[in-house]
Image (cartoon, rainbow, N blue to C red):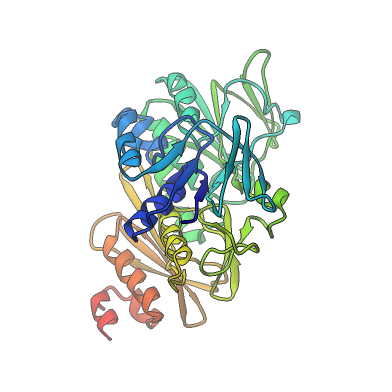
Amino acid sequence: MDHIVIVGAGQAGATVATRLRALGYDGPITMIGDEPLLPYERPPLSKAYLVGRIGRGRLFLRPAAFYTEQRIDLITGRPVEEIDLAARVVRTGRGNVPFDQLVLTTGSRPLRLPARMGGDLPGIHALRTLEDVNRIAPECRAGRRALIVGGGYIGLEAAAVLTALGMNVSLVEQAPRILQRVAAAQTSDYFRALHRSHGVDIREGTALVRIEGETRAARAALSTGEELDVDLVIVGIGVRANDDLARAAGLSVNRGILVDNRGQTSDPRVWAAGDCTVFPWRGNMTRLESVQNAIDQSGVVAAAMLGRSDIYDPVPWFWSDQYDVKLQIAGLNAGHDHVVSRPGNREGSVSHWYFRDEELLAVDAMNDPRSFMCGKQLLGAGCSPDPARIADPKHDLKALIAA
């Protein structure tokens, strides 16, 4: 049987390996990860793990014994240096691993501040890996001053957690409003008010010029001419797909590894899944950064590798926890031309429905799981309800689905 090698030992890589076994594949599987850890969940890192509600052991997707029992050869702490497609070999600093079929689940990495902006000073952190959070945790003490750079979901989640730990938090966003790239003004307004009610100093239309300090980050110079004293800086300005290995190997890449709707790359022996991929979806080449994408696309890849005809056509969904608010998102709102708001059935709950003409594109639901589930079902069925009926809380959402 083919030797299947998986480069990347995160959620996507672990899902491919376990799904292959569940589908009956009995050949050799090797999974290679650059972190010296078992595959683990990332979402709890900046939430429950950072505040101490869960321990390190609860992050792991499976215990070590599982990989042994499933005969998955898990190699950790070994970055891959090169992929030689002609020789069918993955090269690492401690030897080569041959393959018959290869799966790339290399994920993405956070953008960093450049050195000219002081980005190499101690005290400046990203929130991506367990190591990142372990470095941040000792610095998160009540009364200290934290600066969040970036008003996307990562930055807002970090602001909520640090505020809960008793820190004085400021957040700067150079765009005119927080969440501008990913959400409507109505959703931005909701979360701006939420964070300010918890004491976060949100500064929109304000760019970071540089971080200053003699031995570590101590001051932030802003585009307004102000300076903020800081003890800790967290940078949440976006991520970049880890497509370097694929590019160097000669695979097609464009903002990520290009795959078809089964996860196959430009080389028929090579597959890819998760954050690192760009795939066809509803007429566009799309890249998703979510647990849902990592799991579901990986399942399709495993099935396709075994000759099944599964196609990846998701209804994208995401979530974000901030204070006592759970935001749930279904669909992608790119291209919307109007938004309809609907009050939820309890105080503080609301949903925003994105339309292009009469076509439903996406739903943002704040503490409103009913609207999220209904929106997700409608999107999955390709149905677009009358926006006027959505806006009228007297119309039952379940009746819209039945119709």
- Kindly indicate the quadrant of the structure image that contains residue 123: top right
Find residue 23 and report its horizontal and vertical position in percent: 34, 61
Q: Residue sitting at 70 percent across and 53 percent down? A: 86
The single residue placed furthest to the top in the displayed view is: 215
Quarter of the rendering containing residue 362: bottom left
Question: Residue drawn 76% across and 29% down?
Answer: 116
**Residue nearer the viewer, 72 or 278:** 72
Residue drawn 57% across the image and 68% down it: 260
**Residue 165 point in image, percent of width and height:** 37, 27
**Residue lying farthest to the bottom in this orientation:** 403
> Residue 319 location in percent, x, y?
39, 53
Q: Residue at x 43, y 32 (%)?
A: 37
Q: Is residue 11 left or right of residue 55?
A: right
Does residue 34 appear to the left or right of 117 in the view shown? left
Q: Nearer the viewer, residue 270 or 215?
A: 270
Please identify the residue farthest to the front as the structure is shown. Answer: 1
Q: Position of residue 251 (x, y in %)?
A: 68, 57
